[in-house]
Image: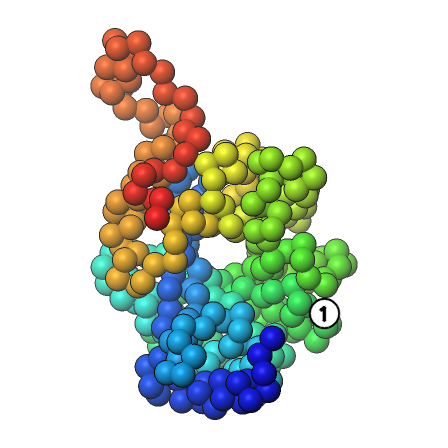
């Protein structure tokens, strides 16, 4: 619990955070569970405040919403996400970036138009941007329908984050034009050991696919969990097993290093290397499916 005096001080600091270069972004990779290919990254905002040190968005974003500084912070965030995409593009990497949007921004019917203009200015295709919406933001589904529909019309993806922990009903899930569901880590973490958690994860994956959506599991920290997700047909996975959140300059080296190892582990059988397989056969070795991450992906 933050004291009112501290909250007022944080709110005042947020007004100057962007100008003081105290805000920064980290990017956590997501892989395709079936192939190991990079599926995209999630942009995670951080604030290194002069008075409070490093603060997570779960603490300062609600204060920004209450103090009226959320629009300025969101503007800073989306611009940096787009700039970062163009920088990676110039290095030969084109990937999807997901960015969590405040429920207050979703109430602005013109916000999708603003994002589309920024994408055009920076040269980023709209379909390379995913808007993440937490379940708590979907309480007023009718109010958000026009905004989320505009995102979709403009080619942007919309992912429902933290599914299973918020307030949305299945009716709202049906009403809003999402493209993906993200399964909350509280279910994913226990899925390999707990039958009830595993059933919930399986049900959400099946629900997503039944609605034509992509299923992403967050909070993947164990090889057994990743193998279970693969068996259940989950599309994408994200978590410390795959990679911790990375500084922008670290992503391309990660793709070349750990990303390559993930692809090697999960490459389809049709892409088998006949020379290596012949050597393996001569040595009598077998190559069972991996149950642990590449060593370089474990941080």
- The residue closer to the viewer here, 105 or 148, is 105
Q: In the image, 268: left or right of 62?
A: left
As displayed, is residue 268 above or below residue 136?
above
Question: Does residue 223 appear to the left or right of 160 in the view shown?
Answer: left
Residue pictured at 26% horizontal, 10% vertical: 283
Which scheme is used to colour this image of the protein? Answer: rainbow
Res 49 visible: yes
Where is residue 111? Give x, y as percent: 53, 79
Give above or below for 59 relative to 168. Answer: below
**Dot 1 alpha-carbon crowd within 10 angstroms: few under 14, some 14 to 19, many 20 or more:** some
Q: How many marks?
A: 1
| Residue 48, image x, y percentages | 38, 76
Which of 149 and 38 lies nearest the eye of the viewer?
38
Q: Nearer the viewer, residue 4 or 138?
A: 4
Relative to 21, say whether 268 is above or below: above
* Image x and y of residue 241, in percent: 42, 45
- State which quarter of the image contains the N terminus: bottom right
Decide if residue 168 is on the left or right side of residue 205. right
- Rendered location of residue 135, percent (x, y): 65, 63
Residue at (57%, 51%) from the top-left corner?
A: 185
Is residue 202 visible to the viewer in this orientation of the structure? no
Residue at 40 percent across and 72 percent down: it is 54
Q: Residue at x 33, y 65 (%)?
A: 85
Q: Secondary structure at mark 1?
A: loop
Q: Which residue is mark 1?
A: 139
Tell me where residue 153 sits by quadrant: bottom right
């Amino acid at each position: 619990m933050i004291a009112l005096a501290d909250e007022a001080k944080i709110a005042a600091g947020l007004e100057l955070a962007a100008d003081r270069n105290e805000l920064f972004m980290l990017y956590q990779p997501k892989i395709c569970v079936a192939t190991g290919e990079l599926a995209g990254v999630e942009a995670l905002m951080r604030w290194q405040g002069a008075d409070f040190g490093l603060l997570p968005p779960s603490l300062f974003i609600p204060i920004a919403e209450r103090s009226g500084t959320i629009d300025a912070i969101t503007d800073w965030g989306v611009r940096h996400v787009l700039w970062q995409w163009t920088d990676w593009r110039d290095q030969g990497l084109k990937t999807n970036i997901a960015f969590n949007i405040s429920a207050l921004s979703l109430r602005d019917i013109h916000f999708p138009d603003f994002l589309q203009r920024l994408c055009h200015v920076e040269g980023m295709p709209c379909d390379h941007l995913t808007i993440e919406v937490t379940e708590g933001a979907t309480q007023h589904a009718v109010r958000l329908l026009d905004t989320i529909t505009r995102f979709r019309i403009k080619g942007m993806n919309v992912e429902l984050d933290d599914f299973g922990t918020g307030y949305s009903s299945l009716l709202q899930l049906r009403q809003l034009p999402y493209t993906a569901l993200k399964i909350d880590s509280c279910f994913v973490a226990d899925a390999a050991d707990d039958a009830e958690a595993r059933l919930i994860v399986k049900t959400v994956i099946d629900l997503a696919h039944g609605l034509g959506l992509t299923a992403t599991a967050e909070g993947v920290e164990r090889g057994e969990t990743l193998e279970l997700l693969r068996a259940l047909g989950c599309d994408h996975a994200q978590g410390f097993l795959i990679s911790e959140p990375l500084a922008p300059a670290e992503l391309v080296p990660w793709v070349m290093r750990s990303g390559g190892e993930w692809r090697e582990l999960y490459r389809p059988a049709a892409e088998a290397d006949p020379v290596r397989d012949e050597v393996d056969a001569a040595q009598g070795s077998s190559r069972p499916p991996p149950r642990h991450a590449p060593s370089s992906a474990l941080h």
